[in-house]
Image (cartoon, rainbow, N blue to C red):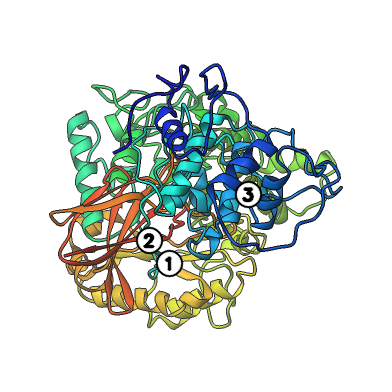
C-alpha cells in the first residue's frame, strides 16, 4: 500500500499528494528547504529533464548535440544530455534547449510516449475518440495527437479539477508532473496503482466493424382528402383520430416499411396548426375548426412515426384550392377568401393560378413554414400542377398570361406555364435546403413524361397538359428523389411498368433516387392480384444499380385492409427483413460516432450515444460466419435489446440514414 503520511507542509489536501509522496520516498522528487513542495508551481524544461534522468534508466538512442544555451557547467547539463539521448526531449531548430521555458502538460505526455517508445506497444486507437474524451480535443496540436491518444490508452493522463479537459497547452505544475510520472511507472509495472478521481480512465477498448445491408425506400401515401385513409371520417374525436393514426403507423412498422407520405395540405388548408391557412375540414368537418381537445396532427404524426422508425414526408398540393364546390365553404385565411381573384373554378373544383405571384408566394411560404417549425424528413409534391384537362375547356389564366406578355414576356403560353411550375420547384428546392439542409425534397409526377418517351409508350402528356417538366427537375438535380406514378400492370405494353421505370432511371444524370409509385387501389383479384405488385417490386429491385431504390404505395388504406392479401405479401416475402432508407451522398456522408458503453447483462444489450448529436435510430446486426445480418432497427430512445447468444454489432443512424461503424459484442 502507498503511505498516506505527508512529509510536505503544503500537500496535505492537494489532489496530487499521494503521487508526490510516493515519488518523494523514491528520492525522485524533492521539496524545498522550508519544508514545502509547492505543487502548483510550474515546471521548466530543465527541471523536467532532471526528473526524467532520475526516473528512467534507458539506453542511448541518438547522439547528443551541444545546445548553444547549455554550458558544460549548467546545473542540469547532464540530465538534459541524458533526456535528449534517450529520446524524451529535443531542442529547437536554432540549436537551443531553452531550459527556463515552462513545459506544457501536453509536452510532458508527448515526452513520455516518445521516450518510453510506447507507440511500439500501443496503437493510437483512441485518436478518433479524443473529442468524446476531452472537451478541448480540438486544441491538441497535430504533432501531439497520436501521442495523446496513446497516453490516454496507457492511463498516463491526470487532470485536475476536470478530467474532461486535457489543457494541453497549460504549463505543467509540479503536482501534474508527479502524477503523470507516477502513472508512467505504473504503466511500466514499477509502481502500484494509486486511486484518484483525477486520472483519466481510458475508454474500454471496443472493436468496431463496418456493416451494411441492402437499403430500400419503403413508403406509403396516407391520403387525407375525402377521408380516404385518415381520418376515416371527419369529426372524429381527438382520441379516435390519434388511435387510428397510431394503428396505421404501427402496422407499417410491423411490415418493415420505413416512410410515410402524409398529406398535410390537400386544398389550400392545413392538417396542422397554421397562421397562414385554415384548419382542414377533413379533420373536424368544418374548415377553420381546430381539433377538440386541441392537438397538432402533424406534430403527433411525426412523434409517433419516428418512434417506429418511419420517416415523415409532408405532402403538399401546391395549387388545388378546393376538391368540390358542392360541399362546405372556405374561410379565412384560405386564399379563395383572401384573394378570390387568383382562384378559378375548374369543373367542380377550385384551382389557384400558378402564374400569379400571390399564389407562388403562398405555396412557398406555407411549405417553408412547415419545414421551419416541424421535424419532417422531406417535402413531397404529387402530380397535380396545372389541373388535369376537362374536355373542351381551357384553363382561365388568359389575363395573367396577357399581363406577362405586356410586361415584355417572350414565352409561348405553354412554355410560360411550364416556367411557372419550374420556378416553383426550383425556389422550393433552394428554400428547403437553405432552411434545413437535412430535409429532403421529392416529387411524384404522372408516370408518363410524354407519349413516345420512350418509344411505344402512349398516354397523357404531362409535359404539355399538366405543364410538369419532371425530366428537367431530375436532370437539374432540383429534387432528391422522383417517384413516378407507374400505375399500370407489367403486361400493359403501351404503359409498360419496366420500360417506363428504366426510362426514368436513364435520364437521371444527377444520380438522384427513383422510387416507383405503385397503385394498390387497383387490386381486385382479377386483372390485379398481389402477385402483380410483387412482380413490380422485384422489377424495381432489379434496377437498383441504376438508382431504382424503392417504392411508394398508393395508398395505405389498401395495406391496412389487407386487400388481396397484400399485407401478407409484404410481411412474408417482400418486406420480411427490415431496411433503412437509402442514403443521399449529395446531402451528407458524415456518419455519427459509434455508440459507447456497449455491454451485456443476462443477454440484455445496452449502450449510450457516442456523443450529443441527435440519433434517429439504432441498427442491430448479428454475425453469421463472415456475414452480418440486420436484425432490428430500434428507435432513438431505445438503447437496449434482448438477444440470443451470438456476436452482435450496434450502429448509430442519423436522420439522413448514414450509419456509424458497428460496435461489436459477444453474448454467451
Numbered disc 2: secondary structure: strand
Find residue 146 and report its image quarter.
bottom right
The residue drawn where x is 24% and y is 22% is 292
Q: Quadrant of the N terminus?
A: top left
The answer to whether residue 391 is above or below residue 456 is: above
In this orientation, does residue 359 appear?
A: yes
The residue that disc 1 covers is 210
**Nearer to me, 496 or 641:** 641
The residue drawn where x is 43% and y is 33% is 269
Q: Nearer the viewer, mark 2 or mark 3?
A: 3
The residue that disc 2 covers is 662
User: Left or right of 70: which side holds 224?
Assistant: left
Q: Which mark is residue 144?
A: 3
**Nearer to me, 85 or 563:** 85
Q: Quadrant of the C terminus?
A: bottom left
User: Left or right of 47: which side holds 484?
Assistant: left
Numbered disc 3: secondary structure: helix
Residue 278, position as x, y percentages in the image: 42, 26
The answer to whether residue 37 is above or below residue 349 is: above
Query: Is the residue marked by circle 2 packed among few (<14), some (14-19), or many (20+) residues within 10 Å?
Result: many
Amino acid at each position: 500500500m502507498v503511505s498516506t503520511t505527508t512529509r510536505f507542509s503544503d500537500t496535505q489536501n492537494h489532489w496530487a499528494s499521494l503521487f508526490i509522496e510516493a515519488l518523494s520516498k523514491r528520492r525522485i522528487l524533492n521539496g524545498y528547504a522550508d519544508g514545502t513542495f509547492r505543487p502548483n508551481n510550474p515546471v521548466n524544461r530543465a527541471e523536467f529533464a532532471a526528473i526524467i534522468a532520475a526516473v528512467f534508466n534507458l539506453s542511448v538512442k541518438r547522439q547528443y548535440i551541444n545546445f548553444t544555451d547549455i554550458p558544460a557547467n549548467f546545473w542540469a547539463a547532464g540530465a538534459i544530455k541524458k533526456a535528449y539521448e534517450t529520446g524524451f526531449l529535443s531542442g529547437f531548430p536554432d540549436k537551443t534547449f531553452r531550459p527556463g521555458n515552462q513545459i506544457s502538460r501536453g509536452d510532458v505526455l508527448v515526452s513520455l510516449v516518445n521516450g518510453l517508445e510506447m507507440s511500439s506497444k500501443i496503437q493510437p486507437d483512441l485518436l478518433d475518440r479524443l473529442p468524446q474524451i476531452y472537451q478541448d480535443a480540438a486544441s491538441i496540436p497535430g504533432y501531439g495527437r497520436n501521442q495523446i491518444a496513446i497516453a490516454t490508452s496507457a492511463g498516463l493522463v491526470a487532470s485536475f479539477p476536470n478530467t474532461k479537459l486535457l489543457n494541453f497547452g497549460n504549463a505543467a505544475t509540479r503536482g501534474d508532473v508527479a502524477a503523470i510520472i507516477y502513472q508512467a511507472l505504473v504503466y511500466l509495472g514499477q509502481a502500484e496503482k494509486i486511486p484518484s478521481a483525477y486520472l483519466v480512465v481510458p475508454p474500454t477498448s471496443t472493436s468496431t466493424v463496418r456493416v451494411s445491408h441492402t437499403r430500400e425506400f419503403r413508403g406509403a401515401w396516407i391520403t387525407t382528402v375525402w377521408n380516404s385513409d385518415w381520418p376515416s371520417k371527419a369529426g372524429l374525436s381527438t382520441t379516435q383520430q390519434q388511435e387510428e393514426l397510431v394503428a396505421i403507423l404501427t402496422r407499417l412498422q410491423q411490415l418493415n416499411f420505413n416512410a410515410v407520405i402524409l398529406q398535410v395540405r390537400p386544398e389550400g388548408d392545413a392538417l396542422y396548426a397554421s397562421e397562414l391557412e385554415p384548419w382542414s375540414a377533413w379533420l373536424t368537418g368544418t374548415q377553420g375548426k381546430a381539433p377538440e381537445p386541441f392537438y397538432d396532427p402533424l406534430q403527433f404524426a411525426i412523434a409517433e412515426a419516428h418512434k417506429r422508425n418511419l420517416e415523415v414526408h409532408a405532402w403538399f398540393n401546391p395549387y388545388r384550392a378546393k376538391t368540390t364546390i358542392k360541399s362546405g365553404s372556405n374561410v379565412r385565411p384560405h386564399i379563395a377568401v383572401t384573394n378570390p381573384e387568383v382562384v378559378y373554378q375548374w369543373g367542380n373544383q377550385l384551382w389557384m393560378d400558378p402564374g400569379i405571384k400571390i399564389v407562388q408566394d403562398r405555396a412557398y411560404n406555407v411549405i417553408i413554414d412547415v419545414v421551419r417549425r416541424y421535424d419532417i424528413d422531406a417535402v413531397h409534391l404529387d402530380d397535380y400542377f396545372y389541373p388535369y384537362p376537362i374536355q373542351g375547356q381551357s384553363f382561365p389564366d388568359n389575363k395573367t398570361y396577357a399581363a406577362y406578355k405586356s410586361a415584355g414576356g417572350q414565352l409561348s403560353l405553354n412554355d410560360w406555364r411550364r416556367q411557372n411550375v419550374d420556378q416553383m420547384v426550383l425556389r422550393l428546392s433552394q428554400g428547403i435546403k437553405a432552411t434545413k439542409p437535412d430535409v429532403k425534397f421529392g416529387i411524384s409526377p404522372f408516370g408518363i413524361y410524354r407519349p413516345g418517351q420512350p418509344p411505344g409508350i402512349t398516354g397523357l402528356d404531362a409535359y404539355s397538359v399538366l405543364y410538369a417538366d419532371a425530366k428537367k427537375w431530375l436532370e437539374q438535380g432540383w429534387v432528391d428523389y422522383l417517384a413516378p406514378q407507374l400505375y399500370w400492370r407489367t403486361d400493359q405494353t403501351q404503359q409498360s411498368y419496366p420500360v417506363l421505370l428504366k426510362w426514368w432511371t436513364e435520364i437521371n444524370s444527377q444520380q438522384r433516387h427513383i422510387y416507383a409509385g405503385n397503385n394498390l387501389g387497383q387490386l381486385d383479384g382479377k386483372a390485379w392480384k398481389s402477385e402483380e405488385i410483387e412482380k413490380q417490386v422485384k422489377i424495381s429491385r432489379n434496377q437498383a444499380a441504376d438508382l431504382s431504390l424503392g417504392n411508394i404505395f398508393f395508398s395505405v388504406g389498401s395495406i391496412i385492409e389487407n386487400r388481396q392479401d397484400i399485407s401478407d405479401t409484404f410481411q412474408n416475402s417482400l418486406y420480411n427483413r427490415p431496411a433503412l432508407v437509402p442514403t443521399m451522398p449529395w446531402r451528407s456522408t458524415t456518419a455519427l460516432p459509434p455508440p459507447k458503453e456497449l455491454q451485456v447483462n443476462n443477454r440484455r444489450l445496452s449502450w449510450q450515444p457516442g456523443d450529443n448529436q441527435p440519433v434517429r435510430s439504432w441498427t442491430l446486426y448479428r454475425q453469421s460466419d463472415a456475414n452480418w445480418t440486420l436484425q432490428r432497427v430500434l428507435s432513438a430512445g431505445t438503447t437496449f435489446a434482448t438477444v440470443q447468444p451470438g456476436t452482435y454489432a450496434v450502429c448509430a443512424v442519423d436522420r439522413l440514414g448514414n450509419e456509424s461503424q458497428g460496435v461489436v459484442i459477444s453474448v454467451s
